[in-house]
Amino acid sequence: MPADPRTRLEELGLRLPATSPPKGSYTPAVRSGNLVFVAGQVPMADGELSARGRVGEDVTPEAGARLSRQCALAALSAVDDLVGLENVVQVVKVVGYVASAEGFRGQAAVVDGASNLLTAVFGEAGRHARSTVGVADLPLGAPVEIEITVECRP
């Protein structure tokens, strides 16, 4: 990693949000061995959903990418609370769900918002495998949901 992730966040003008409390019967992140699995994060600000609707209908693809980035920041907050960002060795996997209007095919560009953030924060260690899935609806009416898996130091 070229720089400490906290320093990179600061250089990017970003701050980690407070970790959102679960909206159901789960925990924000779980460590198993050297892996941390983060529950799907929807775009929340001050305890409220930042946007609702489907990308390509109610939300533009560009706004969807910004919301995806917001979800990735929330996921990093959950990682930080559990193990500390400084202990991340590699972002392993990102799964992005995009609530999509009928005929919308730009899901990958929406999830690029999250992927680009992770690479900006962790450099080469932020490059990851990824799945992107278009869905009819997401919890709370969110336009995007991002989950990540990271490898951390023992």
Image: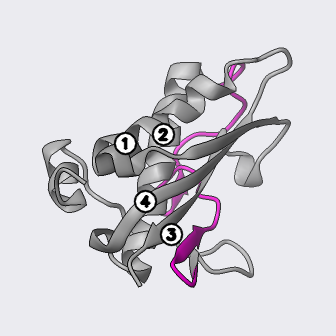
The CA distance from mark 4 to mark 2 is 13 Å
The CA distance from mark 4 to mark 3 is 23 Å
The CA distance from mark 2 to mark 1 is 6 Å
What kind of element bears circle 4?
A: strand
Which comes before the other along the chain, label 4 or label 1? 4
The residue indicated by pointer 2 is 115
Of badges 4 and 3, nearer the viewer stands 4
Amino acid under disc 1? Thr
The residue indicated by pointer 4 is 90
Of badges 2 and 3, nearer the viewer stands 2
Task: Answer above or below: position of 32 versus 95.
Answer: below
Of badges 4 and 1, nearer the viewer stands 4
Which comes before the other along the chain, label 4 or label 3? 3
Q: Is residue 116 left or right of residue 101?
A: left
The residue indicated by pointer 3 is 20
Q: Which residues are magenta?
A: 31-58
What kind of element bears circle 2?
A: helix
Amino acid under disc 2? Ser
The residue indicated by pointer 1 is 119
**Residue 110 in sight here:** yes
Q: Residue at x 27, y 70 (%)?
A: 86
- Would you call the spot at circle 2 few (<14 residues within 10 Å), some (14-19), or many (20 or more)? many
- Would you call the spot at circle 3 few (<14 residues within 10 Å), some (14-19), or many (20 or more)? some
Q: Is residue 66 left or right of residue 10?
A: right
Image quarter where the N terminus lies is: bottom left
**Residue 59 in sight here:** no
Magenta-span inclusion, residue 129: no
The CA distance from mark 2 to mark 3 is 21 Å
Amino acid under disc 3? Ser
Cβ atoms at labels 3 and 1 below 8 Å apart: no
